Image (tube, rainbow, N blue to C red):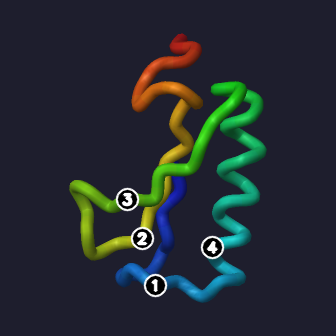
Amino acid sequence: MVVWRHHGVSPPPGDVAHMLRHLGRVAAAQVGDFYVDDHMRNIPDHFHAHARPKGGFFGGRRA
């Protein structure tokens, strides 16, 4: 998961690209095939995005 440092739901495009680039790097190593879920369910006033395993909401390798 990545979280924008500042409160709000509309980070500048450069900030979003930076966060998603790092999320993708870590997710590829830890999860494998993934998709980005940026639907803000539980914290609707603070931008965040999750890397979810392709084909599922949860799952993948767990320690």
Mark 4: give few (<14), some (14-19) or many (20+) Cα within 10 Å. some
- At x 71% / y 47%, what residue is drawn? 24
Q: Which mark is residue 28?
A: none
With 61 as the anchor, is 28 left or right in this view?
right
Q: What is the C-alpha distance between the residues marked 4 and 3?
A: 14 Å
> Hey, what amino acid is under mark 2?
Phe
Location of residue 34 (image quadrant)? top right
The residue depicted at 56 percent of the width and 50 percent of the height is 36
Left or right of 32? Residue 44 is left
Tell whether label 4 touches label 2 (CB within 8 Å). yes
- Please state if 16 lies on the left or on the right of 26 as rendered: left
Circles 1 and 2: CB atoms closer than 8 Å? yes
Toward the viewer: 23 or 63?
Answer: 23
**Which residue position holds label 1?**
10
Q: Secondary structure at mark 3?
A: loop
Q: For marks 3 and 2, give the CA distance.
A: 9 Å
First of labels 2, 4 by sequence position: 4
Instruction: Tell me the SS state at disc 4.
Output: helix
Report the Cα–Cα distance between label 3 and label 1: 13 Å
Q: Amino acid at mark 3?
A: His
Q: Amino acid at mark 1?
A: Ser
Q: Which mark is residue 47?
A: 2
Q: Which residue is mark 4?
A: 16
Residue 39, percent from left and from top: 37, 59
Q: How far apart are the two marked residues, 1 and 4, measured between alpha carbons?
A: 9 Å
Residue 57 position within the rendered picture, expressed as x and y whole percent measured from the top left = 41, 31
The local secondary structure at tag 2 comes to: loop
Mark 3, residue position: 39
